[in-house]
Every structure is written in C-alpha cells, then in structure tokens.
Image: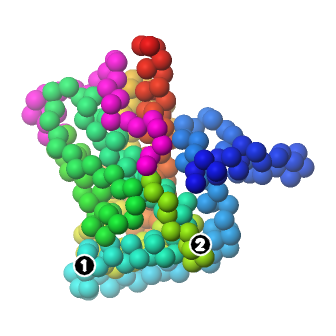
C-alpha cells in the first residue's frame, strides 16, 4: 500500500498554475521522514474526511472533553475500564478508520519502541528494562496497547534517570552509534481493513477517539496520558546528546514537560507526537545507513 501511495506523488504532474500543496510537502526533504510513510500520511491528509468532517466534528469533540472533565470531577473513577476502552478502539479502528491511518498508528508503536531501545543502547553502563510494542495488525489493540504505550514511556524515563543518578552516568555523544535497534527496511504492517466504512482520516479519528479515551479512563490516567505528549522534548534532548547534534530539537512541538497543558487540545497534540516519532526515527535510519556506508 505505501509503495503505491508513494508512486502517486512521484508520478503526479505539476501544474504551475495550480500546484498541489501535498506534492510540495512530499517532495521537500528538509524534514527527515520515511518517504513511504510520508506519502501515506499526506494522502490521508488530503482525504475528504479531513477536509469536510474534521472542522465540523472537532468542536463537538472538544465540547465532550470539557463535559467529561466535569463529570470526572464528581465521579473520578466511575464507568472506567481499560479493557472495554481498548475493545471499543479496536472495533472503531477496524470498522471506521482508513487503512492509511491505521497503518500510521501501528507504525507509531513500532517506531517508538525502537527509539527507546536506541537511547538505552547508547548510554553505556545503564540497565533499563524495556517492554517493546511492535504490532503488525489491529489485534494487539485489544490488549491495552495505547495504555501500555504511555506506561512504557514514563517507566523508561523514571528508570533511566534513576540509573543515571545512582551510577553517576552522563549522557554523551556516542561514536559510532549503536543503531542495531533501528529498522531501515519496511515495517511489516499487514494490510488494513479497507471496506467502504473505513473512511476516517488519522486526525479526525484521533479527535473522535480522544473523548472516548477520556471517558473510559480514570481522570488520573487520562491526565497522565496527555502529559506524556510533552515528553517528546525529553526524548529529543536525550537523542540529541547521543547523536551530538541539536538539530533534532527544532522539529519538536510538544515541549516543556514541566508546564503541563490542559487536555482540550490533546487530539491535535497527539498528531504532533506521532510526527515527532516518525521524524526522529527517520533521522536515526539515515544515520544508520550513512554509518554503514562509511564502514563498508
């Protein structure tokens, strides 16, 4: 699927009087991004769902976030079930979300796991347990996939920093980099459901699922999940120290984890979180290929 979508942009004619905005973004190589994933994401962005549904549904989604927040103040643990939440998410993704969007969601878990392992592998002297999530189809969603993803990130940051402090280890530039964790070949995502009902683009699906996520989680769990998005900067700083370059930090939009934001824009920030993961992984994949060429 991704290769065909990439060909869509590679072969798109350029009308100088009516240039396609997504073609311009696709062809630009200023920001590291896997070309096939980038084409998949941009094709998803150009869908009618995102153009016409998102502006209508987003205000209602954020209204429900406010209403559920008020509800959770009075009943913080009522009607909560991670198991039921993830089965609802699984059904929704399988039935309504586009193949491109589902692929990008599963890629996110896969790439995120590889990035955490890369950081762990390039800090000599630390021992941090990992719980990699590498789903290739939608079935693992039913097993608390989204919640475990958030827990993995927090547990990694806490365990890593306790190790660094206890052993007085400093995160420094590594040369050569240990890039064994980074996959440069195609991520083996299986074909996603492509029925006529699978029409929701990534951004619209996230906006719709965010209040559902909030409803089925405790208030504490939802706040923790939304605050995890600002750990993008923490991960970016760690990776920058290891690589020896701060260029990566310019690509991060979820910043300042010490100043938690409200949950109202959690859906939009989640999209930025996904793009930050894609960009960092693409940068590491480029470094792996360059390092292999230099040593060959």
Name the residue carrying label 2: 199
- Is residue 260 in the magenta section? no
Circle 2 SS class: loop
Q: Which residue is drawn at 69% across and 40% down?
A: 27
Q: In this view, does 259 lie to the left or right of 203?
A: left
Q: Residue at x 25, y 31 (%)?
A: 121
Q: Answer yes or no: is residue 6 visible.
A: yes
Circle 1 SS class: loop
- Is residue 174 in the magenta section? yes
Magenta part of the chain: 161-188
Q: Answer yes or no: is residue 262 visible.
A: no
Which is nearer the N-term, disc 1 or disc 2? Answer: 1
Disc 2 crowd, CA 10 A, few/some/many (<14, 14-19, 20+) = many
Disc 1 crowd, CA 10 A, few/some/many (<14, 14-19, 20+) = some
Residue 111 image offset from top left, x and y in percent: 39, 46
Name the residue carrying label 1: 81
Please tell me which residue lies in front, 215 or 101.
101
Q: Which residue is drawn at 32% across and 21% down?
A: 174
Q: Which of marks 1 and 2 is in front?
A: 2
* Image quarter of the C terminus: top left
């Amino acid at each position: 699927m991704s290769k065909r979508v990439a060909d869509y942009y590679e072969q798109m004619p350029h009308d100088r009087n009516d240039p396609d905005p997504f073609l311009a973004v696709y062809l630009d190589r200023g920001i590291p991004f896997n070309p096939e994933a980038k084409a998949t994401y941009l094709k998803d962005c150009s869908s009618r769902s995102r153009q016409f549904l998102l502006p209508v549904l987003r205000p209602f989604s954020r209204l429900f976030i406010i209403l559920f927040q008020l509800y959770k103040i009075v009943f913080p643990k009522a009607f909560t079930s991670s198991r039921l939440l993830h089965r609802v998410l699984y059904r929704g993704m399988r039935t309504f979300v586009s193949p491109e969007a589902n692929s990008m969601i599963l890629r996110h878990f896969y790439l995120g796991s590889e990035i955490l392992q890369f950081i762990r592998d390039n800090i000599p002297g630390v021992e941090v347990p990992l719980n990699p999530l590498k789903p290739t189809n939608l079935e693992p969603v039913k097993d608390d996939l989204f919640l475990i993803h958030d827990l993995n990130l927090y547990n990694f940051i806490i365990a890593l920093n306790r190790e660094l402090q206890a052993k007085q280890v400093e995160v420094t530039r590594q040369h050569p980099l240990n890039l064994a964790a980074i996959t440069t070949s195609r991520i083996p995502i299986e074909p996603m459901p492509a029925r006529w009902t699978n029409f929701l683009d990534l951004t619209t699906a996230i906006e719709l699922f965010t209040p559902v996520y909030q409803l089925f989680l405790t208030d504490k769990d939802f706040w923790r999940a939304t605050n995890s998005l600002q750990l993008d900067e923490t991960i970016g700083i760690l990776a920058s120290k290891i690589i020896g370059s701060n260029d990566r930090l310019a690509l991060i939009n979820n910043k300042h984890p010490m100043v938690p934001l409200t949950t109202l824009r959690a859906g939009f920030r989640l999209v930025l979180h996904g793009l930050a993961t894609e960009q960092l992984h693409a940068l590491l994949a480029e470094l792996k290929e360059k390092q292999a060429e230099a040593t060959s």
